[in-house]
Image (cartoon, helix red, strand yellow):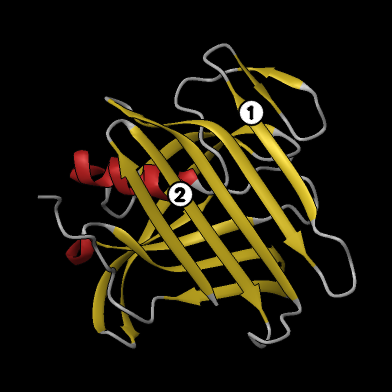
Amino acid sequence: NARVQWVRLGARYQVHMDVAVGPSFAPLMSRNMTSDGELGEAGLTPRRYDEATKLPFQSPRRVSVQFTPESVTLANGSTRAAMAGVQDTASQFVQMTWLFTTQPDLLRVGNSISLPLALPRRMDRWTYEVVAEQRLYTPVGELDTFHVKPRRGEDRPRGELSAEVWFAPSLQNLPVRIRIQQDADTYIDLMMDAAPLQAAPEG
């Protein structure tokens, strides 16, 4: 089970992602991810990423990534020079939605987009390819989507998480399916089970 919440106040944003594996009363694993930053002409600019992972009978494991215009500080305290457009684990999906909305020609089979991605332990440039159009049969009905998949580089660490995403143009290019893969036998496959909720305009 997963829940994604997008909060915006002026130029400030937060993305909250909560994922739980197993029964809700006693999950085998849960992970809470928060991206906090600013919105601008280039989309999302993260300033801080926080992640908390809980396993049964263990204390929560927490990691953070800090962003400044000049540098990125990873969870182990090492610092990297900032890359233009860098995203974090949670913000990357919203940034792709923003790219596909502002540049709709990108969301075509055969195209690709490149994102600098600061994970808790490493920073690298990831390339996502639009590999297929696919109709999904979801609890909210049939949806035509574009399947976007990361290109795996030879230098990726063994067991590093990657995510395939299905974006639905009819739902403001939002992700409606996310498959998070660790290896051939370990993955989480999430499908949207309710229509997105939007707050009413103020005033």
Q: Is residue 11 left or right of residue 155?
A: left
Residue with the mark numbered 2: 15
Q: Residue at x 64, y 28 (%)?
A: 66
Q: Residue at x 9, y 50 (%)?
A: 203
Query: How packed is label 2: few (under 14 Cα within 10 Å), some, or many (20 or more)?
Result: many
Q: How many marks?
A: 2
Q: Which circle marks residue 189 in the picture?
A: none
Q: Is any atom of residue 103 visible in this view?
A: no
In this orientation, which residue lies closer to the viewer: 161 or 6? 6
At which x and y percent is residue 161?
Answer: 68, 55
At which x and y percent is residue 104?
Answer: 19, 45
As shown in the figure, which amino acid type bears the numbered disc 1? Gln
Q: Which residue is at the far top?
A: 70
Q: Which residue is at the far left?
A: 203
As shown in the figure, which amino acid type bears the numbered disc 2? Val
In this orientation, which residue lies closer to the viewer: 195 or 11? 11
Residue with the mark numbered 1: 66
In this orientation, which residue lies closer to the viewer: 79 or 55? 55
Screen quadrant of the N terminus: bottom right
At which x and y percent is residue 56?
Answer: 84, 75
Task: Check whether the beta carbons of the residues at disc 1 and disc 2 lie within 8 A of each other.
Answer: no
At which x and y percent is residue 78?
Answer: 79, 23
In which quadrant of the rendered view does residue 196 lie?
Answer: bottom left
- What secondary structure is marked by label 1? strand
Q: Where 182 sits versus 186, above or below?
A: above
Q: Which residue is at the far right?
A: 57
Q: Which residue is at the far front?
A: 203
Q: Residue at x 30, y 55 (%)?
A: 109
In this orientation, which residue lies closer to the viewer: 141 or 5? 5
- What secondary structure is marked by label 2? strand
In which quadrant of the rendered view does residue 153 lie?
Answer: top right
